[in-house]
Image: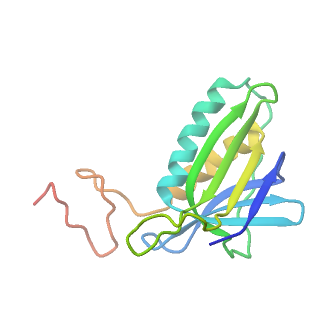
Amino acid sequence: MSDLFAEYDAVDAFAVGALGEPGQRVFLLQCRHGDDRITIKMEKQQAQAMALYLRRVLEDLPATSTPPTTSSIEPPFDTAFVLGEIGLGYERDGARVLVQLEEVEETDEEGEPLADAPRGHLRVFLSPEQALAFCEQSDDAVAGGRPTCRWCDLPINVDGHLCPKMN
């Protein structure tokens, strides 16, 4: 478990990307603030869910004419923790988007959460431009994976696909 506890009112970069071959990729979220670089391992579905919600939040914020602030994940890719709970929201007055990321809970042999285990925590505020750039990066990273079957929507592997609807 991680003892990382970081909170930033503003960040220099907030990016998502995938490393590896389709079907074997690892999704990473990376936040940079000055000399601090925090990399968090996440699931593809978490990246998709964050982008979906952030787009909804951005619809409620005042429109901006500034293009998205692009950044990308950069080495080293040493992860601080594996992403568990995600909290998203926005600050109306400052027109900023809140992202709060918590480490997945450590459990005992029976699957019960360990009560006093430290959990990594990252809380940042993003500009609308940074949030939009994250959404676009998430879309690109997800689209770079395996194609999906048109009948069952499951991923098609390089060596084929056993479609449950075509059986």
Q: How is the image coloured?
A: rainbow
Residue drawn at the location 74% of the way across and 69% of the way down: 74
Q: Quadrant of the C terminus?
A: bottom left
Residue drawn at the location 75% of the way across and 48% of the way down: 124
Q: Position of residue 3 (x, y in %)?
A: 71, 69
Q: Quadrant of residue 93?
A: top right
Question: Position of 38 compared to 43: left or right?
Answer: right
Q: Position of residue 156 (x, y in %)?
A: 32, 64
Vertical arrangement, residue 144 with respect to residue 100, above or below? below
Vertical arrangement, residue 139 with respect to residue 81, above or below? above
Q: Position of residue 143 (x, y in %)?
A: 49, 55
The reply to whether residue 68 is visible in this rendering is no
Residue drawn at the location 78% of the way across and 58% of the way down: 6
Residue drawn at the location 52% of the way across and 53% of the way down: 46
In the depicted view, which residue is nearer to us: 107 or 77? 107
Q: Residue furthest right?
A: 34
Q: Quadrant of the N terminus?
A: bottom right
The reply to whether residue 55 is visible in this rendering is yes
In the depicted view, which residue is nearer to us: 68 or 77? 77
